[in-house]
Image (cartoon, rainbow, N blue to C red):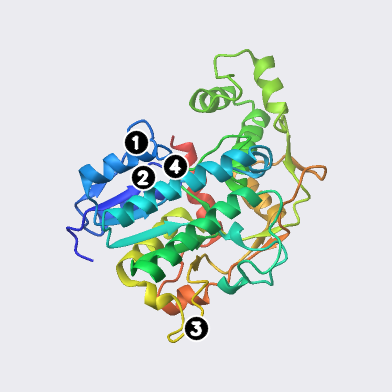
């Protein structure tokens, strides 16, 4: 792809979008376009159309989405399905109307059935029921990949859908209630460690950056302890959701960005299915490491990285989610991309970044 190609990165301030933006810049792309949510509400179809009319991007990377952790997916089900469907409809639809030459849509491996054979191949899509917890989000992402596939088949477009595994990295969301599992654990264990060390300066600094239920670093000690206890954070103890037994795969967000740019540059729709196929489906590409770790072992790894020597408790009354979810990345490897950052190095990088904020 020519380095002068005008590329719109939707969601360029988020976990993945910011990493994609930086990766594109590092590779020499000079005509990047991004808009914050305040500048462009992707739920507003008229606003999205005006944006495409004005900017006329030649390529689009759709990394914008309404995302969250287990609690948010379970209790905010309508938000997850309608907002993601609307974002996808607006951006993919306007990309087609404006003749965008290449589009990469970022989905999620939550699209796969709860009981899918492991490791999960792309062909497992729609073969059995989804995990209930995040079913609305998964259905929205399935609709997005099917939009890409269907536009390609009917209109000859070149829209590629990639399904990243669990991501973590710089600019992640560390909200104690609606973030993903790894950043939530990093923050909980960090705060429990600070309390154990009597480091109230660090606790207050953390709450000033990211207030919890309106409580920031200016609050009294007792008020801070009360609100943190609500999220399982106490002196010498941190309580995490579930049993700790589920197995998960994690990918450093900057590697996801590199894989996304690789797909944009080197993969066409015709590369995503077998030549001569009578029924063209499952053209999406899994993006991951092909390696897994238990949530319990991950918590221990984070605790070791942070230096927390207290107790980690597990609240089995809270849902575990899918018990195992490991992607088969053989399709990605065959296309020419492999990960390089393992979970141990990634957690260290994550915590270093967190401390530097």
Q: In which quadrant of the rendered image does the N terminus lie?
A: bottom left
Measuring 27% from the left and 40% from the top, which residue is drawn there?
50
| Residue displayed at 65% across by 49% down | 134
Secondary structure type for disc 1: loop
Decide which of tag 2 and tag 1 comes sooner along the chain: 2
Is any part of residue 44 visible from this angle? yes
Mark 3 vs mark 1: give the one in front.
3
Label 4 vs 1, first from the N-terminus: 1
Q: Which residue is mark 4?
A: 171
Return the x and y of residue 234 as percentages of the image width and height.
72, 30
Depth check, mark 2 against mark 4: the one in front is 2
Look at mark 3 in the image and give the residue it sits on.
278
In the picture of the structure, the residue carrying the numbered disc 1 is 40
Calculate the distance from the C-alpha at mark 3 to the C-alpha at mark 2: 38 Å
Q: Mark 2 highlights which residue? A: 12
Q: Which of 34 and 297 lies nearest the eye of the viewer?
A: 34
Secondary element under disc 4, as helix, strand or loop, is loop
In this view, the residue in front, 18 or 68, is 68
Select label 4 or label 3 by which is in front: 3
Q: CA distance from mark 2 to mark 1?
A: 12 Å
Determine contact: label 4, label 1, CB under 8 Å: no
Q: CA distance from mark 4 to mark 3?
A: 43 Å
Camera sees residue 179 = no
At horizontal 30% and vertical 67% (from top left) the residue drawn is 265
Helix, strand or loop at mark 2: loop
The furthest residue to the left: 4
Is residue 349 toward the left or the right of residue 41 in the image?
A: right
Front label number (3 vs 2): 3
In whole angstroms, how far apart are the C-alphas of marks 3 and 1?
41 Å
């Amino acid at each position: 792809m020519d380095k002068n190609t005008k590329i719109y990165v939707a969601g360029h301030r988020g976990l993945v979008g910011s990493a994609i933006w930086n990766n594109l810049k590092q590779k020499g792309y000079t005509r990047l376009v991004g808009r914050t949510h305040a500048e462009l509400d992707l739920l507003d179809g008229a606003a999205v159309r005006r944006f495409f009319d004005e900017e006329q991007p030649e390529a689009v990377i759709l990394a914008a989405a309404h995302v969250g952790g287990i609690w948010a997916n379970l209790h905010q089900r309508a938000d997850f399905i309608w907002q993601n469907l609307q974002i996808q409809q607006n951006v993919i639809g306007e990309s087609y109307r404006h003749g965008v030459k290449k589009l990469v849509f970022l989905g999620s491996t939550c699209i796969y059935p709860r009981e899918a054979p492991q490791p999960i191949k792309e062909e497992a899509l729609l073969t059995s029921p989804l995990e209930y917890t995040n079913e609305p989000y998964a259905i929205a992402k399935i609709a997005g990949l099917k939009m890409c596939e269907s536009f390609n088949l009917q209109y000859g477009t070149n829209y590629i859908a990639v399904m990243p595994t669990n991501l973590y990295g710089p600019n992640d969301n560390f909200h104690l209630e609606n973030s993903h599992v790894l950043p939530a654990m990093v923050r909980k264990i960090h705060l429990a460690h600070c309390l154990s060390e009597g480091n109230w300066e660090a606790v207050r600094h953390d709450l000033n950056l990211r207030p919890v239920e309106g409580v920031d670093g200016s609050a009294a000690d007792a008020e801070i302890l009360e609100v943190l206890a609500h999220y399982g954070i106490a002196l010498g103890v941190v309580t995490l959701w579930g049993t700790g037994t589920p197995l998960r795969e994690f990918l450093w967000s900057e590697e996801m960005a590199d894989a996304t740019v690789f797909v944009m540059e080197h993969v066409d729709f015709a590369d995503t299915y077998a030549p001569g196929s009578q029924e063209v489906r499952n053209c999406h590409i899994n993006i991951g490491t092909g390696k897994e770790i238990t949530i319990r072992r991950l918590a221990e790894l984070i605790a070791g990285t942070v230096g927390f020597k207290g107790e980690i408790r597990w609240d089995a009354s809270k849902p575990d989610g899918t018990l195992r979810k490991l992607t088969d990345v053989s399709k990605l490897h065959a296309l020419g991309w492999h990960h390089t950052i393992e979970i141990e190095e990634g957690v260290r990088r994550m915590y270093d970044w967190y401390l530097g904020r």
